[in-house]
Image (cartoon, grey):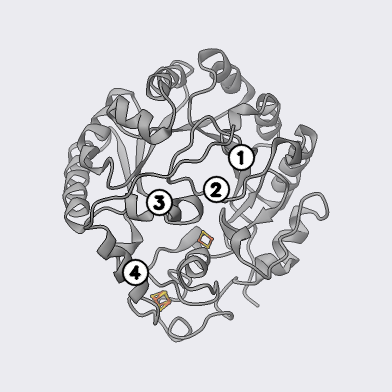
Amino acid sequence: MPTIDPPLALLAELTHRCPLSCPYCSNPVELERASGELSGEEWRRVLREAAALGVLQVHFSGGEPMVRRDLGAMIAEAASLGLYSNLITSGTLGGEREITAFAEAGLRHVQLSVQDHEPSNADRIAGLAGAFERKMKFAAAVRAAGLPLTLNIVVHRQNLDGVAAMIDMAEALGARRVEIAHVQYYAWALENRAALLPSRAQLDAATRVVEAARERLKGVLAIDYVVPDYYGVRPKSCMNGWGRQFLNVMPSGTVVPCHAAETIPGIDFPSVRDASLADIWYRSDAFNRFRGTDWMPEPCRGCDRREIDWGGCRCQALALTGDAARTDPVCALSPDHAVIEAALGDANAAPPPLVYRQFR
Ligand code: SF4
Ligand code: FES
């Protein structure tokens, strides 16, 4: 059994409700209804347990966390516990009044999603007319409240050619950081993979733009760039390893090591309604199932990267091979790597239409 350190961060998924309907959403295909969500008091108890467990950061997320009217009280609770709190939002609900109140309650950082630099394409991808304009106003309100701003832009074949303008937009909005992240193909995003996966040429051109901008904007704007692992030869270290640093509490109170874990059959994910976070983190089968390296099959078991990438992503292995305990197929050493090669073939064909879902 590996040594288990306390978790670093809690992702509090307050709700699945959201005014947007992005086709790359990585939330589950089956979403939680408002009636099944944890109450504000339950969430505040979760925050107290998290702080006692050693968690340092809480990320309020969703869906859209601002649909919860009690978000301010949760931010205040996190601040009183000494937790660093970050709001991950679409910026389409509320504005200056709300963000100023959150800052006064102790919020420390805002991460705002934007779908493109070009308003009509951004609104088309978000599935909501006028969303881009609201986001621009929201970004200004965040800066006016004195909070540091990160723009989060998910990129794919339908917006990737505008990456230079996206970086200019982040700079003009006064963001300290922009995260340009290629779609990760789980859950709803996998349904749209053929419409979203860029070609190699498109990816290489965007990567060159990002590298040049990083040089030019050193000390002004930090640029995080998450490349699509389908084009790599080794997988990403998903969540920095299962049950090593992160825990997610879902809207219903179910606790998972990553946002897609509930798709894995045969694991009974515990709830904060039935067990303490400490019990769940240290002793549950769910968190111990893929912790460390004991669970690994070959080729991971004998590989010198097994404690670097931890065998890649369990949820991706499940989605692409039907078995979460296999090596992540994006690894070129995986016996299942051919499924990735086949998907890359689709990236050169004409894209099918995007498939949207609504959950408001
Ligand atoms: Fe990582 Fe396993 Fe591939 Fe080695 S074989 S690089 S541990 S996924
Ligand atoms: Fe679940 Fe990667 S998203 S392990």
Disc 1: which residue: 16
Give the label on residue 192, or none: 3
Disc 2: which residue: 27
Image-based side of 12 in relation to 303, left or right: right
What amino acid is labelled 4 in the image? Ile
Asked whether the beta carbons under mark 2 and mark 3 sit within 8 Å of each other, the answer is no
Mark 4 Cα shell of 10 Å, populated few (<14), some (14-19), many (≥20): some
Mark 2 Cα shell of 10 Å, populated few (<14), some (14-19), many (≥20): some
Of marks 4 and 3, the one in the foreground: 3
Q: How far apart are marks 2 and 3 (CA)?
A: 13 Å
In the image, residue 316 sits, relative to residue 212, either above or below, namely below
What amino acid is labelled 1 in the image? His
Seen as rendered, the residue at the extreme right is: 274
Query: Which circle's residue, 2 or 3, is located before the other in the chain?
Result: 2
What amino acid is labelled 3 in the image? Asn
Considering the numbered disc 4 on the image, is that residue within a helix, a strand or a loop?
helix
Query: Which circle's residue, 2 or 1, is located before the other in the chain?
Result: 1
Picture coordinates of residue 10, whole percent (x, y)? 62, 47
The N terminus appears in which quarter of the rendering? bottom right
Query: Quarter-wise, where is residue 336 in the image?
Result: bottom left
Considering the numbered disc 2 on the image, is that residue within a helix, a strand or a loop?
loop
Q: Is mark 3 within 8 Å of ligand 2?
A: no
Q: Distance between the residues labelled 2 and 1?
A: 8 Å
Residue at 33% from the left image edge and 63% from the top image edge: 230
Query: Which circle's residue, 1 or 3, is located before the other in the chain?
Result: 1
Disc 4: which residue: 340
Q: How far apart are marks 4 and 3 (CA)?
A: 15 Å
Query: Which circle's residue, 1 or 4, is located before the other in the chain?
Result: 1
Q: Distance between the residues labelled 4 and 2?
A: 22 Å
Q: Is mark 2 within 8 Å of ligand 2?
A: no
Residue 226 in view here: no
Front-most of residues 116 and 82: 116
